[in-house]
Image (tube, helix red, strand yellow):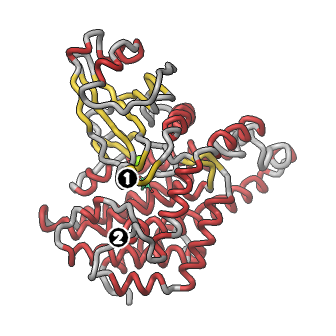
Amino acid sequence: MTQSNSYQPLTVDTIAPRLGEINAITDHLGNNPNAWSADEVGDGNLNLVFIVKSPKGAVIVKQALPYVRLVGDSWPLPLKRAFFEYHALTRQMARAPGMVPEIYHFDEVQALIVMQFFAPHVILRNFLIAGKRNETMAHEMGLFAARTLFRGSDLSMDTSTRKADLALFADNAELCDITENLVFSDPYFDAGMNQHNSPQLDSIVARLRGDIDLKVGVQHLKAKFCNNAETMLHGDLHTGSIMVTGDETKVIDPEFVTYGPIGFDVGMMLSNFLMAYFSQPGHEVKSGDRADFQEWILGVVDTVWASFCAEFSQLWRTERTGILYQKTLYEDQGHDLAAEQALGQRLHMIWVDALGFAGVEMHRRILGLAHNADFEDIADEDSRATCEARSLELGRQLVVNAAQFAGMAQVIDLTRVINRGNWT
Ligand code: SR1
Ligand code: MG
């Protein structure tokens, strides 16, 4: 880790002169910065992201800006989010090896991380919009979630390490504040930065904002997000934070890292697959029938959850070395059944939480500030509104009835019913 002087945002022209003498970078790009070329490719809401290439190789340079890029400098945001992303990546690398980019260089003052460039990987959201498949991603993402969420929790960690990490990531307060407001509050009232597909969705939006059961359910979920510091979350595990080829899967961008409920990451991920599902009819105009592809996405939803449960259970049985549910109380007393009972009950709690969090994510991506390309790329606003309305409806059912779903098959059945448009 090298530190430099005062913070300066990079440009494509200053990258080579500013980074050209850092060994950890020249190891990948070579010693002739004049031969480097840089493109700014950031399409997220917050940061600068450059691909820097040379005849020898390529790296990603990600630099935080002192404000929210999506909104501009009227919304300041601290640079320290790069520090938290760096620490989250190092932990994810240890807990789910091979799934996140290797870090070559971190500069805290410049809020800069230089890391592995994944090629020819593309952002999963764009891959799904294009109707492309990856047959291993769902399983891999279930493993990633189980490994990072189990190994970052009291189920695995000793008390001093766990509490040190809780304290470390507690300072990522401004990004938590974004989630607390943008996900759990703004969509449910007429907040200033909200936007939705209007007038098509106006009556649905009014109905949701007047829905007492929904508004109470969402605040219970917000309380869980704020109060239940169960594990180190990725914090923003949507399909824009996943990169794929046809057979590889990587996870990026954990700057929203915080200690929170295990079901949050799982629910965000499931939600984004369900929104990809509902958006598919809107993309048919460009590329033909997507019914088979929609069914494939439902298979992804099923596999992510099954893979998560299987790996979480395996880790519970083999790596439960932390503060909670100690083996001294269970297996060592011959009470293996008690350990299995506790596992089943914990998984059920995660399941109910995940469904609720999935529901709010579906709402905020359609009613709040930060939308997703799955819907935004649908040019015809009526067609887009149809897809969005179905997603809003499933979101409402997931929040309000989370505890009633017996399993993923029931969620998938309801998703199909809503997609057919005959739920009212
Ligand atoms: C102002 S930031 C808006 C959203 O972008 C990020 O990707 C997070 O999802 C955040 O909620
Ligand atoms: Mg991001």
Relative vertical location of residue 232 with respect to residue 59 in this rendering, above or below: below
Q: Is residue 311 visible?
A: no
Q: Which residue is mark 2?
A: 195
Q: Residue at x 37, y 52 (%)?
A: 239
Q: Nearest the camera: 114 or 278?
A: 114
Q: Nearest the camera: 422 or 195?
A: 195
Q: Which residue is mark 1?
A: 239
Q: Mark 2: is the Cβ under 8 angstroms from ligand 1?
A: no
Percent x, y for residue 120? 25, 35
Percent x, y for residue 369? 39, 64
Q: Amino acid at mark 2?
A: Gln
Marks 2 and 1, how far apart at CA = 21 Å
Under circle 1, the secondary element is helix
Relative vertical location of residue 135 with respect to residue 82 in this rendering, above or below: below
Q: Nearest the camera: 410 or 12?
A: 12
Q: In the rendered structure, which disc, 2 or 1, sits on the residue that comes first in sequence?
A: 2
